Amino acid sequence: MFDYLLQYLFYQRSQRWERRRLEAHQDERLRRLIRHAGERVPYYRQLFKQIGLDPVKFSGREDLHQIPLLDKETVRTRQQELIADNANRYGVVWESTSGSTGTPLHLIVDRGARSNKLAALLRSYHWAGYHIGMKTFSLQSYYLKGGDCQYYPLYRVLRFDSNRLKRDSAAAVIRMIQKLKPRFFMGFPFDLVMLARFAQEAGLTIPPPVALVTYGETLSEHKRASLTASYGCPVFTYYSQHECASMIAECERHGLHLCDDFACHEIVDTRTDPATGKQVGELVGTGLYNYAMPLIRYRTRDSVVVSETQECSCGLSLTRVGDILGKQCDYLETPDGRLLGAVMSHSIDNGKGVVTSQVVQDALDHIYVNLVVDGSYGEPSQQALERDLRKRLGDRMQIDFRIVSELEKRPGGKTPFILSKIGREYG
Ligand SMILES: [Zn+2]
């Protein structure tokens, strides 16, 4: 249970390592992971044979390019083969995600990967000004049973469910914040912007925290400025995903750093060659700790900007990146005045037989869900999806389902998970 505390001490040390030592750590961890994958993971046993890779001779980062990139489709369709024969040994937990692309993904994360992720996450919060034991406020998608918000004294955290954010509930949680005075805020940027807006409209003051960290959606410059002004504190961003394949955190001097001690990252261009200079590329990551289901050279589908300089006044030797562009994403508006972002995709995650999905809003009270499905999709799957969506969208939204062979694209060629055709802009 306290694995993560030991890991936390490790990450406190490793952040101060020289570049050479960090890279040696990555090489050593990669060698161990690739040997394990070659021995224990059916997908990699077959792949390595096919490409003629001998895991025993694999040396580290310089040999990584021999292994093809891994995309979400492969993880989804060959999920069972990616699970190690001896996965149970590592203490596994199922995770389910689809990010903002609307493609469901089910995966397992083992105990070691989870404690490493928590420890590295706490380190990044520490950079922003958090200390273990500090009272926090968290606004993200929870399915809280006992109301819109709940305080957990053991963890000293006040949680507010972003799915229930509207004027009345916002006023109630702001009163709780005024009473409890949490010192550290975190959550989805869009919802934090909306909470501040509701506070302003109601003439309520939110006591300023020490810092605020956002995650889950891209933090645009516009939202960062708006949050900094509304909450009266410095704003930081944090990026990772359920897959535990990559992590980016913002240091105390507001530089964005790849957590090289947690994962081995690559930034690739459209030809999947390494992106250099001040270029935009796709973030590809190899988590160093998930032995139950290793994902090697995993394509995150998120775009990042390569940094022109590696220097940062914080003194850390973790690789810098220029910016996180993430994915483009729209929002849905509900007839009762709530706005829902990419988090909607989680409602469709567990739909049996759903291969890929998209939500399109064409009227304030009407959405349709485009679904690409396989043979296991049926009436029960649709009923379950509708139930889940209804929970978030309320009773006044009409919901239709369309089985399609392709999702709708934007003129620029992007296929967003949420496509809003009602032309309202927020944030
Ligand atoms: Zn820095």
Image (cartoon, rainbow, N blue to C red):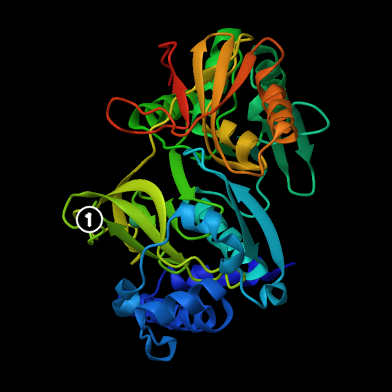
Mark 1 residue crowding within 10 angstroms, few (<14) / some (14–19) / many (20+): few
Q: Is residue 243 visible?
A: no
Q: Quadrant of ligand 1?
A: bottom left
Q: Residue 344's spot in the image, x, y percent?
A: 58, 31
Residue at x 47% of width, y 39% of height:
101
183 shown above or below 282: above
Q: Find disc 1 in the rendering and name its residue.
A: 271
Q: Quadrant of residue 71?
A: bottom left
For this rendering, which residue is in front, 140 or 296?
296
Q: Residue 8's spot in the image, x, y percent?
A: 58, 67
For this rendering, which residue is in front, 80 or 188?
80
Three-letter code for the amino acid on which mark 1 is drawn: Arg
Residue at x 69% of width, y 26% of height:
386
89 shown above or below 173: below
SS for dot 1: loop
Q: Residue 399's spot in the image, x, y percent?
A: 63, 17
Which quadrant is home to the N terminus?
bottom right
Q: Residue 345's spot in the image, x, y percent?
A: 57, 35
